[in-house]
Structures are given as structure tokens and as C-alpha cells.
Image (tube, grey):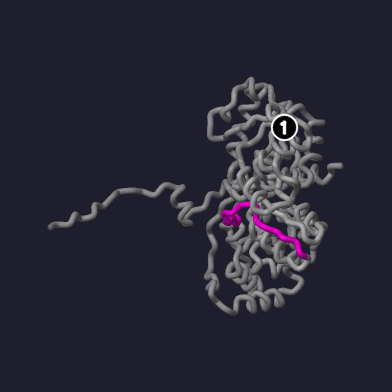
Amino acid sequence: MTTAQPQELDVQPTPLALLLLGREADPRSERGVECPGDLPSPSDPDLVARARAAKEKLGDKVFVLGHHYQRDEVIQFADVTGDSFKLARDAAARPEAEYIVFCGVHFMAESADILTSDDQKVVLPDLAAGCSMADMATAEQVAECWDVLTEAGIAEQVVPVSYMNSSADIKAFTGKHGGTICTSSNAERALDWAFEQGEKVLFLPDQHLGRNTAVRDMGMSLEDCVLYNPHKPNGGLTAEELRAAKMILWRGHCSVHGRFSLDSVKDVRERIPGVNVLVHPECRHEVVAAADHVGSTEYIIKTLEAAPAGSKWAIGTELNLVRRLANRFAPEGKEIVFLDKTVCFCSTMNRIDLPHLVWALESLAEGTLVNRIEVDKETEAFAKLALERMLALP
């Protein structure tokens, strides 16, 4: 019996394959992959002590921000916790801190750099901590979309509104074209403002937040919304469809919140009689419509804080936060469960782990600046303009 000899295949990896393997970076997207230096071993039992020691050595020179979706092992070292915009504003309120270590994802660190002074340096412990939603809208795609709107003869009527969960490039596009930024807390106010400026809104990059705000909160119909797909010619829409629409929604979504389904809601109601379903507005429209309560991360936390003892809750948001809230409120007799049976962490947010945080803090303590996030001045100026419009909302 003979065995076949393996053939040599002349296959060259594509840029996308190299990107996914972590050997290349795409400077036009959120995703970064380079993380120089040697990380401590994840099994190192001294990691917690090392993080404390490095943080104490840095003292007031460092300010650590921890997003709600971070792991508990990381969040314990945060000076403040919150959602993305709250953390960026907290960083701006600490001008004495030379280093802002942002335990979150790339677009959040960009926002912190935009809002802080030139003397402050924003550090992301792992540059691979991107955001799949933010990745779904690149500057080139959005510029092409604007060309499509121009050809349809409606660009002058359109006001862009971009979710905070977007890259600095998209925020800058928004500022340059007379639009504003929004959060999940103030999306309705942002849209009210936008419709005072123009007849239509281009909502980037999360279709679900845009649709839920327009239909659930503002009384529009689903027919008022069209979905622009950047991977199809002209977004997959006719000029007539664009002219008839009030809301032009970008085809983007959160990989975590987009997983929840109507079946998830039905199933949890059958399993837990009397349960309250509380979801984030990044969830699909049918999930939001079936929920008892809908709101931002901060709204979810405040709702559970105010909930009576013995109440039961199924939460549709990132699992790290849900588990932390379940543990926090268990002594009060509040039963808190994850909405879906399938465990779902934010995979990119979870790239910020204790080894990366220790490496970043120890490097800074030794005088070595690593993984700095720095937005160029032109992009920063237009992005800040869009953010300032949001801050000026009534």
C-alpha cells in the first residue's frame, strides 16, 4: 500500500485572512491587532497584586475607566465604571491624570481622546478590543452612501445621526455634514433635533436603536424606515424608496444584543412566571416590542436598583453585567437571569483581561507608553463638533 504525498499548494493568504489571524491590521476600521511586548501569563497567581502595585506606583498619574461589560477581574481596578459616553466624560473631568487607561473597546478610547486634553494620553490595554457594530460602517462606505443620497436628490434633506458606538471617522463625517451623536439614553432627543434641521435622518451604525427609537418612542411606522445595506449597489434601495423614507437605517447591529429573539422572551416567560423582561434598545424590534421595560445600560441598572425585593427579572444585555447585577441584588431577594439560554459575552470587550491590564499598567509605571489611542486633529475637530451638538441637546 502506498500513501499519497501531500501536495504543495501555492496559496497566498488574503489580507482578510491575515487580519483574522492577527498578523495584519486594518487602519480604516476599529479592529487593531498589534500588541507589542510580553504579556504576563494568565495563570500567574500574582496578577492581582501586580496590578495593585503598578496602580499604586502611578498614583494620580493614572485614571482607570471600566465599562459595564468588562470582566470582574478587570472592573475591580476601575476608578469609575459606566457606559461609553459617561466614561469619556469622566476622563475629561480628570485633567490631572496623565494616563487614561480605558478598559473598554476602541471607539470608546477614541472618544476619550477626543474629549480629553492634548496632554493626556489614552491607553487601550489590548488594541484588538474593537467593536463589531462600529466595524460595520467604514468611512469609505458612508461616503459612498452619501453619494447615493446625493444622486437621489435628497442629501440636502438628510441629517446624519450617529450612535456613540461608532468610530472617530464616522463621528467626524457626522459633524462635517451637520449631524449629531446620540447615546441609547438620548436617541429620541437627538432625532427630535435632527428632524428640526431636515426632513430625513441617516442613522448610523445600529439599525435596531434607530428603528426602535423612531417607531417605539416617536410613533413612526416601520414603513417610514428603510435599511441601507453598504454591501449592495445603492444600498439595495431605489431612489424612490430613499425619497419616501424618513429614517434611513444603516445595516449594522450589536453582535450581543442582536442575538436575543422573540423565542427568548416567550421561553423565559414560560419558565419564570411573573418575570419582568428588561432589554437594551439595541435588541431587535420584535424583542423590544415584547419586553416590559426598555432602556440603556444605566437605565437597566437603575431599574433593578429600584425594583422591589422578591421581583424576578430577565435581562437582555451583555452577560458580564447581568451576572454582576444578579450577584449584587441577590441579598435583596431579587431574581435576575440572562434573557437567553445561550451564554453570550461581548467577545471583543472580553479581550481586555487581567494580563493585558497588568502589562499596560506596569509599562506605564516603568515610563513606557504603550497602546496609545490618538485621533488625528482634523478628525478630532469634526468629531468633537458632533459630540458638542449632542451635549447641547435640550
Asked if residue 247 can be seen in this view, the reply is: yes
* Residue located at (30% from left, 48% from top): 10
Considering the numbered disc 1 on the image, is that residue within a helix, a strand or a loop? strand
Residue 327 pos. (x, y %)? 70, 66
Quarter of the C terminus within the rendering: top right
Q: State the predominant SS element of the stretch in magenta.
A: loop
Location of residue 334 in the rendering, given as x and y in whole percent from the top left corner: 75, 61
Please report the residue visible at 72 percent of the width from the left and 38 percent of the height from the top: 161
**Picture coordinates of residue 257, whole percent (x, y):** 63, 48
* Residue 134 visible, this orientation: no
Outermost residue, top side: 240
In front: 152, or 300? Answer: 300
- The answer to whether residue 8 is above or below residue 251 is below
Residue lying furthest right = 394
Q: Quick check: is 19 in the magenta stretch?
A: no
Residue at the left extreme of this rendering: 1
Would residue 99 be found to the left or right of residue 13 on screen? right
Q: Nearer the viewer, residue 93 or 135?
A: 135
Give the residue drawn at x 63%, y 61%.
Answer: 124
- Residue beneath label 1, please? 201
Query: Residue 65, image x and y in percent?
Result: 71, 63
Question: Quadrant of the rendered structure where residue 241 is?
Answer: top right
**Crowd class of label 1 (few under 14; some 14 to 19; many from 20; radius 10 Å):** many
Residue at the location (69% across, 36% down)?
211
* Depth order, front residue of 73/231: 73
What range of the chain is rendered magenta? 333-348
- The N terminus lies in quadrant: bottom left
